[in-house]
Image: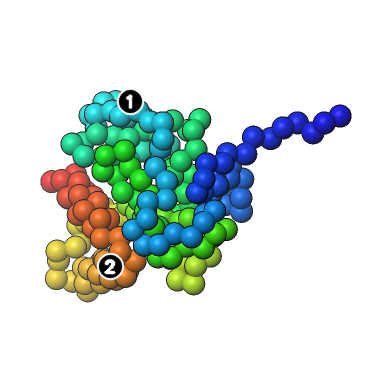
C-alpha cells in the first residue's frame, strides 16, 4: 500500500516544517544577508482592531502581532509563514510588525540553518511561563521576561530590594540592546505602567 502522502509545506526561499526538534520551524534554503526579507509573517491573515474582543481572544494563540494604527494581525494558520519561526535568545532574524508583517535577516544565514526570531514576550506574574530550549550559548532559560506586582511596587523605591529590581531591568535592557531588540522596551514600559495602575 502506498504511504499516505504527508504534505510538506515548501515555498522557496525557505522551507516550513511543521515538525522539527522544536515541533515546527522555518529553515533557510538559500543564503540571506542582513536586511533581506526572508518571508512574510502571515501570507494569509485577518486584520482586527485592537479593541475588538476577537483580537483579544486571538492573542491567546500568541501568534498575533500589533501593527500600525492599533491593528492586530491574526495569521491564518492554514497557510505557513513567518509565524512558524521559533524563538531564540540569539536570533538570526527579526520580526517587523508594520504593514503585513515580515521576517527580516539580522545576521548572515546559511542554507539549511533554522531562521529564528526573538519573541519579546513580557508576562505579568508568570515568571516561568515559557521555558526556552533554544540551545544558544547565552540562553536565558525562559522566553518570557516577567514583571510582577512587587517589581512594579518597588521599581522607584530606595531600598536594596528596589535596587535589585532596577538592576534586573537594566541587565535585561542591556541584553535587548546586544541582540538589537529594543522594540521590547516599549512593552516593558507599558507593562510596568499597567501594573502600577492596578496598585492605586
Ligand atoms: Zn533561549
The numbered disc on residue 15 is: none
Determine the CA span between mark 2 and mark 1.
Answer: 34 Å
The colour scheme applied to this rendered structure is rainbow
Residue neighbourhood size for the residue with mark 1, other residues' Cα within 10 Å, grouped as few (<14), some (14–19), many (≥20):
few
Q: Residue at x 62, y 39 (%)?
A: 8
Classify residue 54 by image quadrant. Answer: top left
Residue neighbourhood size for the residue with mark 2, other residues' Cα within 10 Å, grouped as few (<14), some (14–19), many (≥20):
some
The one of 132 and 179 positioned closer to us in this rendering? 179
Percent x, y of residue 4: 75, 31
Look at the image and tell me in which quarter the N terminus lies.
top right
Residue 131 shows in this picture:
no
Callouts 2 and 1 close, C-beta under 8 Å: no
Q: Is the residue at mark 2 in contact range of ligand 1, meaning its CB lies under 8 Å from it? A: no
Residue 107 horizontal side relative to residue 190, left or right = right
Helix, strand or loop at disc 2?
Answer: helix
Q: Residue furthest right?
A: 1
Q: Which of marks 2 and 1 is in front?
A: 2
Residue 138 horizontal side relative to residue 179, left or right = right
Percent x, y of residue 175: 32, 69
Residue 160 shows in this picture:
yes
All told, the count of numbered labels is 2
From what the image shows, is residue 161 above or below residue 193? below
Residue 106 horizontal side relative to residue 194, left or right = right
Helix, strand or loop at disc 1?
Answer: helix
Tell which circle, 2 or 1, labels the residue nearer the N-terminal end: 1
Q: Is the residue at mark 1 in contact range of ligand 1, meaning its CB lies under 8 Å from it? A: no
Q: Residue at x 14, y 71 (%)?
A: 158
Percent x, y of residue 36: 37, 55
Q: Residue at x 58, y 45 (%)?
A: 17
The numbered disc on residue 177 is: 2
Residue indicated by mark 1: 54
Amino acid at each position: 500500500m502506498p504511504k499516505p502522502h504527508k504534505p510538506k509545506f515548501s515555498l522557496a526561499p525557505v522551507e516550513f516544517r511543521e515538525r522539527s526538534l522544536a515541533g515546527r520551524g522555518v529553515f533557510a534554503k538559500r543564503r540571506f544577508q542582513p536586511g533581506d526579507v526572508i518571508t512574510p509573517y502571515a501570507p494569509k491573515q485577518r486584520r482586527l482592531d485592537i479593541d475588538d474582543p476577537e483580537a483579544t481572544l486571538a492573542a491567546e494563540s500568541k501568534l498575533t502581532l500589533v501593527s500600525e494604527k492599533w491593528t492586530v494581525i491574526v495569521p491564518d494558520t492554514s497557510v505557513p509563514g513567518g509565524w512558524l519561526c521559533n524563538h531564540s535568545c540569539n536570533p538570526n532574524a527579526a520580526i517587523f510588525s508594520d504593514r503585513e508583517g515580515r521576517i527580516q535577516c539580522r545576521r548572515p544565514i546559511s542554507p539549511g540553518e533554522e531562521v529564528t526570531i526573538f519573541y519579546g514576550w513580557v508576562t505579568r506574574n508568570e515568571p516561568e511561563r515559557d521555558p526556552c530550549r533554544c540551545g544558544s550559548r547565552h540562553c536565558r532559560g525562559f522566553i518570557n521576561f516577567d514583571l510582577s506586582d512587587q517589581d512594579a511596587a518597588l521599581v522607584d523605591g530606595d531600598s536594596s530590594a528596589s535596587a535589585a529590581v532596577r538592576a534586573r531591568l537594566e541587565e535585561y535592557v542591556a541584553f535587548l540592546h546586544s541582540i538589537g531588540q529594543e522594540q521590547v522596551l516599549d512593552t516593558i514600559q507599558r507593562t510596568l505602567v499597567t501594573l502600577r495602575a492596578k496598585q492605586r
